Image (tube, rainbow, N blue to C red):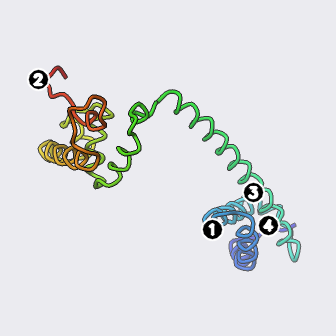
Amino acid sequence: MTVPQDDEFRQMYAANFPPLLGYALRRVEQPADAADVVAETFLIAWRRRHEVPGGPETRLWLYGVARRVLANHHRGDERRERLGDRLRKRLAAVVPDPGAEIPERLAVREALARLGELDREVLTLTVWEGLEPREVAEVLGVNPAAVRTRLSRARARLRELVGDDLRRPGHVSSVLTVPTPEEGR
């Protein structure tokens, strides 16, 4: 068996890429995954080029390699899915949802979703993560004064969206009030 040289390998690639890509596309959910499968198939072919048979057997050999690459791809997906499930269960037990303790959590979540992305992030980093405005500014890469302004506006807008009866104990808006440093923070 002769080892394909660069030109021969290019020709093999050009002749076999379209059918292998079609093969992979029909067996994966995402086109990017198919491209990865074909790329890995040809990488293996390059590394094992001394084993690649010539003539019409080349395509069959490449299909065999692609089949094994796809099998590995699918096993990897299954492993990632199982790991993701375990991680989600563990995270749910370790990191409780701060909004889960509030009876009106759906109203809060809906109102938060209606805020702008930066306002929502400033508010949640301050209230739920317990960061000071200067810390939030560092996380977001903005000026601390801008964080304080956005925080004030975001709180006001959120109160407006969920109701402004702050005197009622347990009202969802009560979670939006974070003590100032003078109040013992």
Residue neighbourhood size for the residue with mark 3, other residues' Cα within 10 Å, grouped as few (<14), some (14–19), many (≥20)? many
Q: Secondary structure at mark 2?
A: helix
| Residue 182, numbered label | 2
N-terminal of the two: label 1 or label 2? Answer: 1
**Marks 3 and 2: in contact by CB < 8 Å?**
no
In the image, what residue type sits under mark 4?
Val
Dot 2 amino acid type: Glu
Tell me the distance, in whole angstroms, between the alpha carbons under discs 1 and 2: 57 Å
Q: Amino acid at mark 1?
A: Pro
Q: Position of residue 67 (x, y in %)?
A: 80, 61
Q: CA distance from mark 4 to mark 1?
A: 31 Å
Q: In this orientation, which residue lies closer to the viewer: 90 or 37?
A: 90
Q: Which mark is residue 69?
A: 3
Residues at discs 4 and 1 in contact (Cβ within 8 Å): no
Front position among marks 4 and 1: 1
SS at badge 4: loop
The crowd level at tag 4 (other Cα within 10 Å; few <14, some 14-19, many 20+) is some
